[in-house]
Image (cartoon, rainbow, N blue to C red):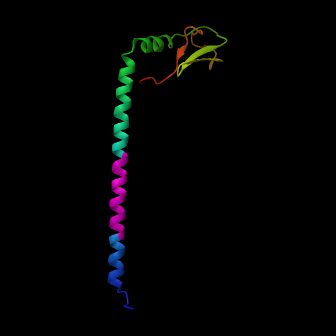
Amino acid sequence: MPKLQPNSILSALVSAAVIGAVILVMVIAAGMIRSHNSRAEYSALLEELEKDPIAVRLRGESDQRCDRVGHEFYWMCGVVIKAKPFSNYGYCSTAERPLYYGHRKS
């Protein structure tokens, strides 16, 4: 059986390190591309939502403040939810006119 030379072992280790580095760079680049595409899609969906008059009205009404309230009503994913207020002074809402709960563009 032939003896391995130190140069061939070092060469194999360097080759493995280079291949590993190339794979790591490719994985990072693919993640960055996916992240960019996700942000672009999210922004497009948010712009579309801001053109919807019902969503705009609901978000505007969600900013109105009331004096002390016993319950607040939220619209989430097509369902109206009754909840205790999160602060001493809650937001104005009723079961018929719930607060919109979703992303707010900052």
Main SS of the magenta part reads: helix
Q: Quadrant of the C terminus?
A: top left
Where 12 falls versus 84 (above or below)? below
View extreme (bottom): residue = 1
Where 77 falls versus 12 (above or below)? above
**Residue name at image x 44 percent, y 10 percent:** 57
Q: Is residue 23 magenta?
A: yes
**Residue name at image x 33 percent, y 72 percent:** 14
Q: Position of residue 50 (x, y in %)?
A: 38, 18
Q: Quadrant of the N terminus?
A: bottom left
- Horizontally, residue 14 falls left or right of residue 88, namely left
Q: Position of residue 89 (x, y in %)?
A: 61, 13
Quarter of the figure with residue 49: top left
**Residue name at image x 36 percent, y 68 percent:** 17
Quarter of the figure with residue 45: top left
In this picture, which residue range is highlighted in magenta? 16-31
Where 82 falls versus 34 (above or below)? above
Q: Position of residue 24 (x, y in %)?
A: 37, 57
Quarter of the figure with residue 73: top right
